[in-house]
C-alpha cells in the first residue's frame, strides 16, 4: 500500500519508518500540511495530523487523484469538513483514544504544581529571594476533594489516579460510567462546584459546553479552589477566570487548552512569539500553569496515534470494518 503522511513531526518519523519496515507499505513523509497545493498523486491513502482546517478543495482534489481515504492521527476533527469529505466520496477516520493516561497524568501534574505553589517558589528563587521561597506552604492532593467533570475515557483514568492519591473524588456526567472499581461519588453540577477543592474538565467542546466555567459557575466554586482545563479551549471564559484570580476566589489555574489557541501556539516547531496579551498576562502569574495543548504529548501517545491511523487506512483499503470512521453515517 502506498501512503502519504502529511504534517509529520520528527518524533513521529521512527514510528512511520517502523510501520513501513514491518508491513512493506511505502510511506512517503512530509512535514507540510495537507492542502490542495501540497497534495500529490499516486497514493492509496493519506495519514495526516494538522490543527489548521482541511479545506473542501482538498477533498475535491483527492477525488480527482483517486485517493479515497484520509486517516487523522489525532482525536479532534473540528477542523475537518466531514460533509465535504462525504460529498467527494472520501472516507475519514480519527484516533478516538490513543492514550487517555497521557492527559489524565498531565492534569495530575498541573494539580500538584498548583497545590505545592511551585510557580511561586520558582519566581522567588529567580528573584534571589530565598527567604520567601521557603514560605509557600503546600496542600496535599490526598487531602483534597477533586471534582471530575466528564467521566469518559480520560475522566475515568483520572479517577483511578486520584483514588491512588487517596483524594475524595466527586464526578459529574449525564452518562456515568459502569466500572465498579472506580471510587467516586456522582453528584449534580451545583454540588460539584460547591464542594470541589480542585475542578478538572474532561468534556468535549460542544456548543452546549461553551464557557461551562463562566462567572456564574466561578461564583459557586469554593473560595481557594483550583481549576484545570486539559479538555477543550472553549470550556472556560478566560476573562472571568482572570477576574476570579484577581479577587483571590480562585487560588490557581492550569490551562493546557487555551481559549485563543491558534495553529501558531499549537505548532510545536514554532519558535515565534505568541502575540496574545491575555496569554502573556496569564504566563506572568505564579499561580497559573500554562502549556500549549501538549497534555497528549507522550511517546506512548505518539506511537499509538501513528499506528492507529495507519491501521485505519489498511482497514479502509481492504474493506474491513473501521470503528473510527467519522464519515460512516454520512456515506
Ligand atoms: P469521551 O468522549 O470519552 O468523554 C467525554 C465525556 O464527557 C462523556 O462521558 C460525556 O457524557 C461527558 N460530558 C459531555 N458534556 C458534559 C458536561 N457538560 N458535563 C459533564 N459531562 C459531560 O472524551 P475523552 O476521550 O475522555 O476526552 C475528554 C476531552 O479531552 C475531550 O474534549 C477531548 O477532545 C480532550 N482531549 C484533550 C487532549 C489534550 O492534549 N489536551 C487530548 C485528547 C483529548
Ligand atoms: C486531540 O487529539 O484531539 C487533542 O486534543 C490533541 C491534539 C492537538 C493532538
Image: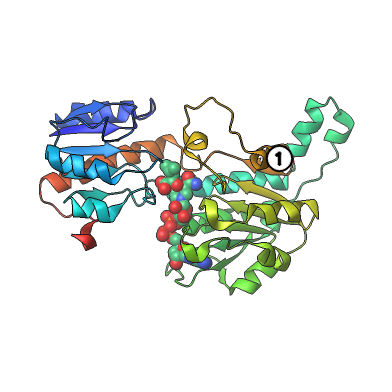
On-image quarter of the C terminus: bottom left
Instruction: Answer few, some or many: residues within 10 Å of disc 1's Cα (few below 14, many 20 plus, some between 14 and 19).
Output: few
Q: Is residue 191 visible?
A: yes
Q: Is residue 270 above or below residue 308?
A: above
**Figure quadrant, ligand 2:** top left
* Residue 313 image point, x, y percent: 19, 43
**Quarter of image, res 306:** top left
* 39, 173: nearer the viewer: 39
Q: Is residue 325 visible?
A: no
Residue tagged 1? 281
Q: Is residue 85 above or below residue 58?
A: below
Q: Is residue 121 above or below residue 260?
A: above
Image point 86% across, 29% down: which residue? Answer: 130
Image point 53% across, 24% down: which residue? Answer: 271
Q: Is residue 190 left or right of residue 262?
A: right
Image point 54% across, 55% down: which residue? Answer: 234
* 37, 320: nearer the viewer: 37
* Residue 286 image point, x, y percent: 74, 40
* Residue 56 image point, x, y percent: 27, 46
Amino acid at each position: 500500500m502506498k501512503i502519504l503522511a502529511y504534517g509529520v513531526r520528527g518524533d513521529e518519523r521512527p514510528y512511520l519508518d517502523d510501520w513501513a519496515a514491518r508491513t512493506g507499505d511505502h510511506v512517503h513523509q512530509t512535514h507540510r500540511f495537507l492542502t490542495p497545493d501540497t497534495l500529490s498523486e499516486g497514493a492509496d491513502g493519506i495519514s495526516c495530523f494538522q490543527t489548521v482546517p482541511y479545506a473542501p478543495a482538498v477533498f475535491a482534489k483527492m477525488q480527482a487523484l483517486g485517493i479515497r481515504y484520509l486517516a487523522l492521527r489525532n482525536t479532534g476533527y473540528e477542523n475537518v469538513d466531514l460533509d465535504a469529505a462525504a460529498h467527494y466520496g472520501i472516507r475519514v477516520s480519527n484516533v478516538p483514544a490513543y492514550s487517555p493516561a497521557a492527559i489524565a497524568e498531565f492534569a495530575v501534574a498541573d494539580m500538584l504544581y498548583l497545590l505545592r505553589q511551585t510557580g511561586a517558589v520558582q519566581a522567588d528563587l529567580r528573584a534571589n529571594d530565598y527567604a520567601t521561597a521557603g514560605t509557600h506552604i503546600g496542600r496535599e492532593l490526598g487531602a483534597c476533594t477533586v471534582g471530575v467533570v466528564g467521566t469518559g475515557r480520560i475522566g475515568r483514568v483520572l479517577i483511578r489516579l486520584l483514588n491512588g492519591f487517596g483524594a475524595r473524588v466527586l464526578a459529574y456526567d449525564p452518562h456515568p460510567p459502569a466500572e465498579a472499581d472506580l471510587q467516586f461519588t456522582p453528584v449534580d453540577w451545583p454540588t460539584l462546584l460547591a464542594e470541589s477543592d480542585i475542578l478538572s474538565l474532561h468534556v468535549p467542546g460542544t456548543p452546549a459546553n461553551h464557557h461551562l466555567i463562566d462567572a456564574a459557575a466561578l461564583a459557586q466554586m469554593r473560595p481557594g479552589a483550583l481549576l484545570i482545563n486539559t479538555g477543550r479551549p472553549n470550556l472556560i471564559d478566560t476573562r472571568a477566570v482572570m477576574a476570579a484570580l484577581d479577587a483571590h476566589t480562585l487560588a490557581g489555574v492550569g490551562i493546557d487548552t487555551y481559549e485563543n489557541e491558534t495553529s501558531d501556539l499549537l505548532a510545536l516547531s514554532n519558535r515565534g512569539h505568541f502575540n496574545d496579551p491575555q496569554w502573556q498576562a496569564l504566563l506572568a502569574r505564579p499561580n497559573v500553569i500554562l502549556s500549549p495543548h501538549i497534555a497528549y504529548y507522550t511517546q506512548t501517545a505518539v506511537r499509538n496515534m501513528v499506528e492507529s491511523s495507519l491501521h485505519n487506512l489498511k482497514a479502509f483499503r481492504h474493506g474491513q470494518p473501521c470503528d473510527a470512521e467519522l464519515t460512516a453515517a454520512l456515506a
